[in-house]
Structure formats: structure tokens, C-alpha cells
Amino acid sequence: MKIGITGATGQLGNLVVHKLKEKVPAGNIIALVRSVEKVTEPGVAARGFDYEKPDILKTALKDVDTLLLISASGLEGRFPKHKNVIEAAKQSGVRWIVYTSLLHTDSSSIDLAKEHKVTEKILIDSGISFTILRNGWYTENYTSSVPGAIRGGAFMGCAGNGKISLAARADYADAAVAVLTGRGHPGKTYELAGDNAYTLSDLAAEISRQTGKNIPYKNLSEKEYTEALTGFGIPEMFAKAIAGWDTGASKNDLFDDSRQLSQLTGKPTTPLSLSITEAIQ
């Protein structure tokens, strides 16, 4: 059985390919990427793949039985790309698509949910066997800001007291591999998130504990946080998006206590403390 992985050199895709090699022969894995020269995993086949070029997608998906469709990057225009891939998969005879969506897509106020929601619909309506992995927030979305918070003396955001069920990117990769190599998953939708939920005050307190410094959480308005991010050099479009996601988190859009992720992988999700330790190092 040939398993195709889109975005295989991206942060999540690369982890999936590496972990999948521990479960299936490398020759059964096809990395679907824009730049084939970036595929470095020994034995893994690399094929040119571009979500925006329908003419090459069908060829790239030849002989692929199972496809992990990792959602496209970017703040806008994901749905047309996903639609291109799903249509090409149908034409190429792909039997099963596993799609990485967003936690609680059907009820989330986070702007990213809109394109995930319509992608889920066309996937379900495609007639191809499917599994939907509604991924929660990566811990790395926040821990990437830890060094800056230490330098600046505060961790900033606008998530208020919202609880965020964080899990490391590697945890989500483990879940994808478990589904791709397991049984009984077609037709199912999983809400994936960390075992434990944290506020950004909890995150700041853990940074303080590990560094021995007082690093408080500074809660701002969405507008103030956007302005702070642009002040750090982040383009305004991305700054607005990041602040908007925090506002969604303040409404508990990123909270889930079902523990479906750890149930899939058979192990606890990565503790926040460990992720912060790695960020500090």
C-alpha cells in the first residue's frame, strides 16, 4: 500500500514521514512536495506536488492508495487548493484520504475554521473514504515566543483566561501515523488536543519557574496585541490573524478534554513543561 504525504517537508509533514518509516517500509511512502530535492529521508520517494497546479496533481497521485492531506499553509485561499487535491485524488483512484483540519471546526469562531469546514464537506461528499483529524493548537505556536518573552520580561497575548489544550507538533504527527497504519478509522472524525489545558498565565508561570525570573502574562486587547506584534516586525496581516486566534482561545475555542489524541497514540501528550524547557534551550 502506497501512502502519499502532502507537505512532506513542512514542519508536521516531515515529522509524519520520519515516524511513518518506523511502521511501514520507506518504499511505501511517497513525499508529495514542491521541491523534491528537499526530501532527505532515505528510501522515501519524492514527487513534485503543488496544490495550485491541478495538471500535475493527478500524475503525482498515481498508485497512491492512502493520502494524508495536510492542510495548505497561508491565511487565505486554502479551500481551492484542498479542492484541487481532492478532485485529483478521485481521478487518480486514491482510496482513502486522511485530512488535517482544525479543532471543533463546526463551532469554532477562529477564522481558519471556515475553509476547513467547507473542505471537510467536499471531502465527505467526494465518495472517497475519509478520516478527519481536527488538530488543536500546537504548543510550538506559543513556545516560539518564549525567548522573546524572557528578553522582554513578559509574555503577551489577548487570550484572557481561555483554556488551551496544547499538544506538541510531534503528538499530532504520532496521531496521524496511528491512523494511517491502524484499523477502523475510515469515516471517523477525531477532535485532537492535548491531555491538559493551560491559560497563557499558566504558560508564563512555567517560564518563570524554569528561568527563576518573574515573567508575568500581560493580557492585552486584540487591537493592542496586534499593534505590539507589528511593533516586533510581524506583517500586519499576520499580526491581526495571530491576535484573532488568541481571541478565539479566550472563548475556549482551543479547549477540548476528550483526550482522543492520547487515545489514538496510546501515550500521554507532551507536557507543557517539557516544551518550554526545549524552547529555553
Image (tube, rainbow, N blue to C red):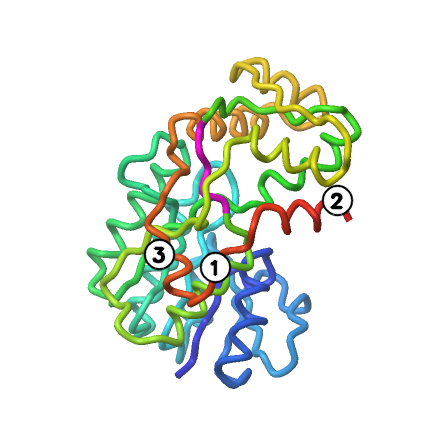
Q: Which residue is mark 1?
A: 268
Callout 1: few (<14), some (14-19), or many (20+) C-alpha neighbours within 10 Å? some
Name the side, left or right, on which 234 lies relative to 133. Answer: right
Q: Nearer the viewer, residue 87 or 14?
A: 14
Q: Residue at x 45, y 69 (%)?
A: 177
Coordinates of residue 164 in the picture (x, y in percent): 46, 37
Q: Nearer the viewer, residue 200 or 59?
A: 200
Disc 2 from disc 1: Cα separation? 22 Å
**1 or 3: tag closer to the N-terminus:** 3
Q: Residue at x 71, y 46 (%)?
A: 279
Name the side, left or right, on which 93 lies relative to 7. Answer: left
* Image vertical order of residue 30 relative to residue 127, above or below: below
Does 164 lie within the magenta span? yes
Main secondary structure found in the magenta portion: loop
The residues colored magenta run 162-166
Q: Amino acid at mark 1?
A: Pro
Q: Which residue is mark 2?
A: 280
Q: Amino acid at mark 2?
A: Ile
Task: Say what secondary structure mark 3 lies in.
Answer: helix
Disc 1 from disc 3: Cα separation? 10 Å
